[in-house]
Amino acid sequence: MDNERIREICLALPHTAETLNWGHVLVYWVGEREIGGKMFALTNADGGQDVVLSFHCGAERYHELLENEGICPAPHMFRAFWVALERWDALRPREIEEELRRAHALIYEKLPKKTKAALALPEKERARLIREQKKLLAAKGGN
């Protein structure tokens, strides 16, 4: 497992967007953040951090996953039930894929109705909405 495989898995999920934040972190979103999307997974693009992958796991899986060697509470995100893999072999590749699918589904369920409605729009309309939101954010100094 590596960042490229994580990218393939995440981008294959519905309504997933990817951004590069904080200089070296690939962030995977359910829905673009401009329309209210939420993060469900993070990887370190440069590989120079203490963790290789962080993801939302929900309250039910949180403590169970922490029992695995090589999995710890995600820095800055543990209160929201995120865990971090300290190395790629902390879980089997199939388990990582299942956890990412679960993270995506959990976050999708938490999205506001307005965001889900935007995601249901035809692609061209959604793209136009995102462009408009980006312009608004830029005008407000938010980008």
Image: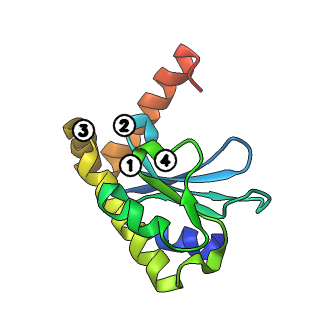
Disc 3 marks which residue?
112
Q: Determine whether, in the image, residue 8 is placed left or right of residue 117.
A: right
User: SS of the residue at dot 3?
Assistant: loop
User: SS of the residue at dot 4?
Assistant: helix
Disc 1 marks which residue?
31
Examine the image and state in which quarter residue 15 appears: bottom left
Tag 4 and tag 1, C-beta contact below 8 Å:
no
Examine the image and state in which quarter residue 50 appears: bottom right
Q: Earlier in the sequence, mark 4 or mark 2?
A: 2
Disc 4 marks which residue?
78
- The amino acid type found where label 3 is placed reads Pro
- The amino acid type found where label 4 is placed reads Phe
User: SS of the residue at dot 2?
Assistant: loop
Q: Is residue 14 visible?
A: no
In front of the other: label 4 or label 2? 4
- The amino acid type found where label 2 is placed reads Gly
User: SS of the residue at dot 1?
Assistant: loop
Q: CA distance from mark 4 to mark 1?
A: 22 Å
